[in-house]
Image: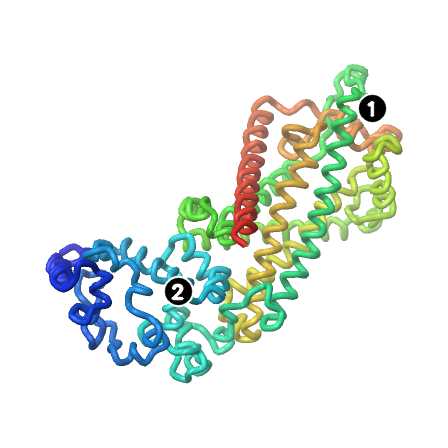
Amino acid sequence: MRAGKLMPSAVALLMILIGAHAASAQDAANLDNATCLGCHGAQGFAAPSADGHMRSLYVSADQFAESVHGKALRCVDCHTTITELPHRNLPTTLAARDRQRLALNKNCGNCHATAWQSYTETYHGQVSAMGFAGSATCFDCHGSHAIRRASDPASSVSPANLLKTCQKCHEDATPGFATFESHATTDDFAHYPYVWITSKFVIGAVGGVLWFFWFHAALWFYREFRDHQQRKLRPHVRTDALPPGEGSYYQRWSALWRWVHLIFAVSIIVLVMTGLSLHYPNAAWAPLLERAMGGPEIAGLVHRVAAVIMIAVFAGHIVYAAIHIARNWNTFKVFGPYSLMPNWQDAADFVAMFKWFFGRRPRPTFDHWSYQQKVDYWAPFWGIAMLAATGAMLWFKTLTAAYLPGWTFNVATVAHGDEALLAAAYLFTVHYFVNHWRPDKFPLDLVIFTGSMPLEEFKREFAVEYARLVETGELKQHLVDAPSRPLTLGSKIVGFSLVAVGLALLVMMAIGFSGNLIGG
């Protein structure tokens, strides 16, 4: 007989035994002449297994009666599917058994609401909520028919037995691993102070920056849109007045940095795609996205590969910058116009920008880097450092547990998740707005893909640098012809694809966040 199917004789036997003694399976679970034990047995609690045979669970009725559940519950309180006569929902395939396993797990929340809520905030609970049965359930750790309170020395989650319980799934688990706070929450300072502090710090710091730049972007959009409505002219250069033979485009990015940006951008988008469903596992789109990523195991593997690529690109950039500065140390100005180090001019430009927002002065002009670009540059140094450190702790769990206490896993999980979510929100709103969605740029700025920008646009955006290059006679060294049509078309396809995926992920984030607010 094919594996995964319940033997017809077993099904028939259960139907006959139940149907002969009761009008319904509910009655069969309660009546003296047809209890659940009448079919499943008092010794060993037999149940259908994946190969179709009835298998003993090696727990007797007496053990169940002495357990926490045996003193307060009936079989049908947990095994709710048996109330459909006569066991119409018996798991006859592996997929059906997985569904029953998840249903049983969810039923734990009917009595243990607080513990269930905290469980759903862990990786185990998030995966289960999306309909994947491969992760640990409540009864995998706590047991079921012979369950005992955690304070009972015989409990599977008592301090003496906890490591052995963890090793059922994590064979290389160490004593430190077993001290992970499996029910820690971010809103219980009294019991989980480190988790509470971490959550509030990350949300306060990164979330505060996000809210500020949303406000900044809203003012920017308002002023730029009003200027367009009032048909205010922006300073520009007449390209037909340039010397014959000179290009009409300014080369801002080399091919190397365009490829670096593309690989970095794709790696970040893949990281968000493979991690976002864990933040909002109860959203309708979460299981669809997780299955599109190949399921939890494949999604986790892809997530780690993308993380390695992102960190490699970031580290490579730092090494390149260090070598470049070392080679040009005699001429390189740390706070000069081509340095990304913040300076006093950035502060002055920031103030001037706000004055323009409120119509109190003309729009400010910038040098090679604007203060907004420097913010976008330096923000990943904080974000990637935190994501890399916490991600490595969670990836190499055994190594982490060998040197750090278990609660650091909880801290790492919260810090990693919250930082990633807020960083993604910044990228898909503020970064996209400044570079693509504001009235002067909408719907897409191609400079990071083609490498060059029209000369008139260069003067508008970076008038200070333009004036310096004209004065020194260096401008012509940076002029190139317009990008080829194939390059322009390819840049549009890639650019719009990246923006569209980012926008779709942003919508998913908004739906998930709204659902959490409504659900409490």
Q: Quadrant of the N terminus?
A: bottom left
Q: Earlier in the sequence, mark 2 or mark 1?
A: 2
518 vs 31: above or below: above
Q: Is residue 491 visible?
A: yes
Which residue position holds label 2?
A: 108
- Which type of secondary structure does the marked residue at label 2 adopt? helix
479 vs 39: above or below: above
Q: Is residue 469 visible?
A: no
Question: 153 and 297: which one is in front?
Answer: 153
Would you say 62 lies left or right of 210 here?
left
Q: Quadrant of the C terminus?
A: bottom right
Tell me the amino acid under the disc marked 1. Answer: Pro
Question: 328 and 156: which one is in front?
Answer: 156
Q: Which disc number belongs to residue 235? A: 1
Where, by quadrant of the figure, is residue 12 drawn? bottom left
Q: Position of residue 462 (x, y in %)?
A: 80, 33
